[in-house]
Amino acid sequence: MGDFRYQGIKVDGSRAEGVVTADSRQAALAQLEQMRLTPIDLREVDGAHQPGRLMSPGRRALGGRIRATDVEDLTRSLAVMLRAGVPLDRSLKVMAGMAQSGGVAAIINDLHADVKGGKAFSAALAGHQSVFGDFYINMVRAGEAGGQLAEVLGRVGEHLERFRELREGVISALIYPAILVVVAALSVFLLLTFVVPQFETLFSDMGDALPLPTAIVVSMGHLLGDWWWLLLGLVSLLVMAVRSFLATPRGRLWLDLRLLGLPILGALVRKYEVTRFSRSMGTLLSSGVSIVQCVRIAAQTVANSHLRAALERVTPHIKKGGRVADALAETALFTPLSLNMVRLGEETGRLDSMLLELARVHDAEVQAGIKRALTLIEPILILTLGMAIAAIIISILIGILSVNDLAA
């Protein structure tokens, strides 16, 4: 048994807080449901568990930085309170008091002040466009126009959650190959700087008779051991120069084109971006945003600049009265199956549902593609590491055998 401190909203919209005793978090939630409370925050009093909001298990923001998970938390919490009948200004005030970050609290306080002053919620969000983005703001505007703000915020929360899961899935899949690369670099560095110098006295009397592979390894050991600080500085300068170049539009376009040209990863990047576009456009359409705005905003959610430019050319085609499927076909990004799904959605008046289904299909394909790519990348990295270490060891052995031959 444990004590759980809760904060919740009553049926009349007032705030309630207290402590319940339960065997687990799920049992505590059941008790709050029996008390007819809408839970906002629940944490174990003894601190055995990390405190966390019910709306999302995302990470907390550090300092004043606003993370994507904070926006997701805010959206889901606000949707729950609005569904419970709590007025918007009251909901924002409650959430500002429970914010875990000073930056988040400041933004919510600004939103509360704007709403209290008579602004529409979408107009208040527009003052923080860099945090929420056009997609979020237009979704809220559509929800306000249709009187379905709570439902629309719920959809936005689900949309943000799926994006987070997809992004985290990709990052998690790349952790192991990254570890292999780091281990390989450290192993080679240690061999050249600590192991190879131990044999240098053995090779010192051979002079020019030292075999070429052994001479190369010994020279590399000297280079890394004596000039590692200079090499580290040069690598740091190179990294800074590359980052500065990639921060420019030209550099970003160059990198995006190279990514698309990779044999296996290029197709995955393409599908990943199509997934983002389809899910964003389907979510916007389901909330009543005009199709021209949907295409424009959804195209901005695409990270690859080359693909984004191709999708932005869809808007003029639609403005002229063209069909969405035909406009998307001209981008050469969508597969025949995807275009048929879009065309069927247009003909049946269910384009939003078809786009969301297309996003789910591509999402599964991206995850499967990542697994297939890793089955190829991981053995290649392991073999490369083994070959590099084997080459160093063989070079040393060749030198030792040469010393024995001279002694004989």
Image (tube, rainbow, N blue to C red):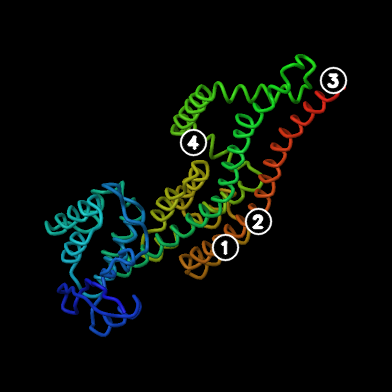
Q: Position of residue 131 (x, y in %)?
A: 31, 49
Q: Which residue is tagged 4?
A: 252
Q: Amino acid at mark 2?
A: Arg
Q: Earlier in the sequence, mark 2 or mark 3?
A: 2
- Marks 2, 3: nearer the viewer: 3
Q: Which residue is tagged 2?
A: 372
Q: Earlier in the sequence, mark 4 or mark 2?
A: 4
Q: Which residue is tagged 3?
A: 406
Mark 4 to mark 2 CA distance (whole Å) = 27 Å
Give me the residue at 51% from left, 70% from top.
348
Horizontally, residue 374 falls left or right of residue 89, namely right
Q: Earlier in the sequence, mark 3 or mark 4?
A: 4
Residue 13 in the image: above or below residue 110: below
SS state under label 1: helix
Q: Amino acid at mark 1?
A: Ala
Mark 2 to mark 3 CA distance (whole Å) = 52 Å
Front residue of 138/36: it is 36
Q: Residue furthest bottom?
A: 34
Residue 58 in the image: above or below residue 307: below
SS state under label 4: helix
Mark 4 to mark 1 CA distance (whole Å) = 27 Å
Q: Position of residue 1 (x, y in %)?
A: 31, 79
Horizontally, residue 334 falls left or right of residue 382, namely left
Q: Disc 2, disc 1: CB below 8 Å?
A: no
Residue 364 shows which numbered tag? 1
- Marks 3, 1: nearer the viewer: 3
Q: Amino acid at mark 3?
A: Leu
Q: Position of residue 408 (x, y in %)?
A: 88, 22
